[in-house]
Amino acid sequence: MYPNRNEISEIIPGIRETFSHLKYLRLDYNKIGHLESDVFRGLLKRKYINLKGNKLQYLQPDTFSGLPNLQKLFLSKNSDLQVPNDRHFITSRSLKPLGISGRNASSVSVETFAKFGALEWLDLSFNNLRSLDINILKLLPKLSVL
């Protein structure tokens, strides 16, 4: 499904019933500002979600936890998206690439990435990072691209 580059501002309840069979969901470059914590729950086949270039400000840590097969997630260019430093950001055991570039973040911490066991690729470009804790690399043993 590719409803990208439209004027979509919210994902309404019912997405599970309507799009349960889809593996790819591209909602990039829309106007989505908020996601309910269970909006994607039950979409067990979902492998790819692109929310790049929206107006997201905050994500619940369990927003993507109901997606056991999610392998790719792109959240870049959500300049107001808050990524916490004191707790994990997202829970995912299957996520391999994660794009969170272009957010104006000044820091990330070990706690931010505590629930990313399979992460191989992490894009933090175009942020305002002043330092990067080396323990993040130790926490992500499969990470090969940063």
Image: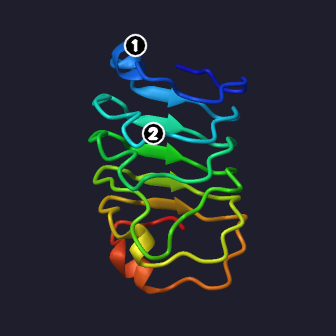
Q: Residue 10 versus residue 20: which sits nearer the camera?
A: 10
Q: Which mark is residue 89?
A: none
Quadrant of residue 70 within the rendered picture: top left
58 sits to left or right of 77: left
Instruction: Name the element at disc 2.
Output: loop
Q: Report the amino acid beneath label 1.
A: Thr
Asked whether disc 1 touches disc 2, contact meaning CB atoms under 8 Å apart, the reply is: no
The Cα–Cα distance between marks 1 and 2, rounded to whole angstroms, is 17 Å
> Judging from the image, what secondary structure is the residue with disc 1 in?
helix
Q: Position of residue 119 (x, y in %)?
A: 38, 60
Indicate the position of residue 17 as horizontal and vertical percent values. Answer: 34, 15
Name the colouring of the figure: rainbow
Residue with the mark numbered 1:
18
Rendered view: 38 above or below 11: below
Among numbered discs 1 and 2, the one appearing first in the sequence: 1
Amino acid type at image mark 2:
Glu
Residue depicted at 63% across the width and 41% down the height? 33
For the point 66% across and 69% down, the residue is 105
Q: Where is residue 134 drawn, in percent x and y?
A: 47, 86
The foreground one among 103 and 97 is: 103
Q: Which residue is mark 2?
A: 36
Q: Residues within 10 Å of mark 2 (few under 14, many from 20)?
A: some
Q: Quadrant of residue 79?
A: bottom right
Q: Give the position of the C terminus as an image quadrant.
A: bottom right
Dot 1, how many residues are within 10 Å of its Cα: few (below 14), some (14-19), or many (20+)? few
Can you tell which of label 1 and label 2 is closer to the viewer? 2
**Which residue corresponds to the image point at 41% horizontal and 60% vertical from the top-left?**
120
Q: Nearer the viewer, residue 59 or 113?
A: 59
Q: Is residue 136 above or below residue 21?
A: below
Q: Residue at x 59, y 57 (%)?
A: 100
- In the picture, measured across the screen, residue 93 lies left or right of residue 52, that is left
On the picture, is 50 further left or further right than 42? Answer: right
